[in-house]
Amino acid sequence: MALNSNVPSGPLAQKWDKHKFDLKLVNPANKRKFEVIVVGTGLAGAAAAATMAELGYKVKAFCYQDSPRRAHSIAAQGGINAAKNYQNDGDSIYRLFYDTLKGGDFRAREANVYRLAQVSVNIIDQCVAQGVPFAREYGGLLANRSFGGAQVSRTFYARGQTGQQLLLGAYQALERQIGKGTVTMYPRTEMLDLVVIDGHAKGIVVRDMVTGAISSHAADAVVLATGGYGNVFFLSTNAKGCNVTATWRAHKKGAFFANPCYTQIHPTCIPVSGDHQSKLTLMSESLRNDGRVWAPKRKEDCSKRPRDIPEADRDYFLERKYPSFGNLAPRDIASRAAKEVCDEGRGAGPGGKGVYLDFADAIKRVGEDKIRERYGNLFDMYEKITGENAYETPMRIYPAVHYTMGGSWVDYNLMSNVPGLFVLGEANFSDHGANRLGASALMQGLADGYFILPYTIGNYFATNKATKPSTRHPEFKKAEAAIEALTKKFLSINGKRTVTSFHRELGRIMWDDCGMARTEQSLKAALGKIPKLREEFWKNVKVTGEIGSLNQDLEVAGRVADFLEFGELLCLDALQRNESCGGHFRAEFQEEGEAKRNDAEFAYVAAWEYTGDLSKPNLHKEPLVYDEVKMSTRSYK
Ligand SMILES: Cc1cc2nc3c(=O)[nH]c(=O)nc-3n(C[C@H](O)[C@H](O)[C@H](O)COP(=O)(O)OP(=O)(O)OC[C@H]3O[C@@H](n4cnc5c(N)ncnc54)[C@H](O)[C@@H]3O)c2cc1C
């Protein structure tokens, strides 16, 4: 099957405007005849649901938390990029576009990335109008700071709580529509299946997480904005609830999954401290504006207190290796550099798995109060977790799984290959290629939700008749029966191992064999272990509680069962990509320690089709064509 990205023709800078004009419109009076299901009310989903409702569509929105305010987006700390050039430091739409494309190691779709940079400026205006309290300069202009992979300051922020403030903005917009009756909100409701009728997405099957009731919802289109799948690694900086269930089950109903092996390992996280942990904590990339990353030059110094290691014996390895970007080298590059140092035996802290992030120079330069003002909540969080005061001693950091660039395949309209199924935010694969730059996920989620989907979904409605089916349709009944049977199966196994023990073991396989570095050998090993673990899961898992009530064990069992299938696809994708690019580092393909791409053979999006046999999915390739930009070897030196 040929994948059609539906990228419009014409010059890059005019594609989106031309496309918006060419898209068919739905007249205002007809909009209320269309019903849209939005699964997920994080930044992408809340923005989409509120905007579509404002346009006049009838929206049903779903999330598994008790309130949209608790979506994982709330965790975002550092900021959101936009090409406003308020700093007058040489930024432009073109520069944001180029930085993002290059940051993604030339594995993203050029036209999507350009549109993202264009739309970024509107996002800031919209959020300011909503009252999002972005940090401001003395004179009143919005303040900016720098993030990795950029030499300009274009990141807008609200202390270390940018995601929370943006989500409150989107949530208010959503609540307004809920109040008006244009959005019906279903919190504590988990989507467990997608229903496809005559080839079009027409609804979902959900479980009420409080009563356990399974039911169906029909619509004219379905939007998934269900976030990323980083928790396939068990330990990650993601909220514990983040999972792959919605996009995975849609995959099993025909939606292609693109580039699953592109996962982002973030360099500045609090190191793992033991087997008791169930999650990891990010120390925002914004800290690298002022913090300097270093490790002892000599192994013998690793057990010394950092303050006892003199300047001459410290290796500021990012500044040494990447002088022009220094501590703000992109995440994939900074993570690998930290791993390299620790692999050489120069890591700090327990187990040698850590490097220092030191604020001593910045405190000397601008004073402790200024640093407190910029990052106070992050320093407090660090102290609560480690018991160390980072104003006095450097933070210890180590890379951890953080974000997933892969996701459902979507075209330029954000529609999957299943007509009527749209996928937004971290759940799609669209804009970040093989590595996302810091502060670009919030930008993409809000671009998708506020400014792209509301246009493109109209074209789908205008070119397809409103045919919302009844939930009595046999496809709904079949899907409900399958979910009920699956639920009963979980509870009937009554084995000896907890759901979490399986998840933890899967995570270890994924991290050891398909983590920061992968090889053909390690991937083949993982592909041997995962099906065996899955087989044991279905024989030996113990899921406690009952069907007809709140049952968190059951909820997690469903998500882990999906991770156990999805993990195999992730490894297969990593195995077929015989090159290194961005966050996908195949140790066999490197040059002087840097990722070595193979553009001649691998400049494509890998879009996988479910075949019923988990070990033999079909690979479809969408060629990546660059009209405007020349693919070059990334250099941050
Ligand atoms: C610690 C941390 C800090 C970060 N900081 C930044 C930053 O500073 N800047 C930046 O740009 N990015 C940052 N990111 C990344 C960014 O926060 C996320 O990529 C982004 O918020 C994802 O938004 P989303 O709307 O796509 O999904 P989410 O916010 O994850 O929302 C997912 C929604 O889907 C719902 N859902 C999922 N599955 C189901 C289901 N089966 N049924 C019903 N509902 C479902 C959930 O309830 C939720 O409402 C950070 C990430 C982390 C982990």
Image (cartoon, grey):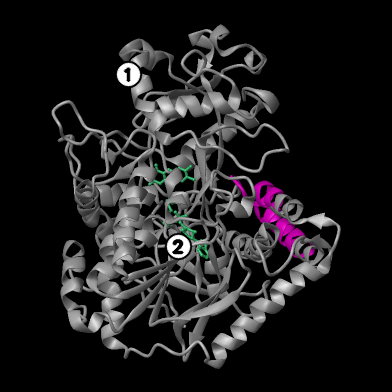
* Secondary element at tag 2: loop
| Residue name at image x 84 percent, y 64 percent | 494
Name the spot of residue 249 as percent of width and height, x first.
57, 72
**Main secondary structure along the magenta-highlighted residues:** helix
- The answer to whether residue 609 is visible is no
Q: Which residue is mark 1?
A: 370
Q: How many marks?
A: 2
| Mark 2 sits near ligand 1, with its Cβ under 8 Å away | yes
Kindly identify which numbered label has been placed on residue 40.
2
**First along the sequence among labels 2 and 1:** 2
The quadrant holding residue 107 is bottom left
In this picture, is 595 found above or below 340?
below
- How would you rate the neighbour count of disc 2 (Cα within 10 Å): few for under 14, some for 14-19, many for 20 or more? many
The quadrant holding residue 573 is bottom right
Q: Is residue 514 magenta?
A: yes
> Can you tell which of label 2 and label 1 is closer to the viewer?
2
What's the amino acid at mark 1? Lys
Q: Which residues are magenta?
A: 507-532
Measure how far apart labels 2 and 1 are at the Cα level.
Answer: 37 Å
Front residue (pair 251, 32): 32
- How would you rate the neighbour count of disc 1 (Cα within 10 Å): few for under 14, some for 14-19, many for 20 or more? few
* Secondary element at tag 1: helix
Kindly identify which numbered label has been placed on residue 345.
none
Q: Is residue 3 magenta?
A: no
What's the amino acid at mark 2? Gly
In this picture, is 209 found above or below 3?
above
Name the spot of residue 116 as percent of width and height, x first.
28, 57
Quadrant occupied by the C terminus = top left
Name the spot of residue 307 as percent of width and height, x first.
54, 9
Left-right relation of 498 to 476 = right
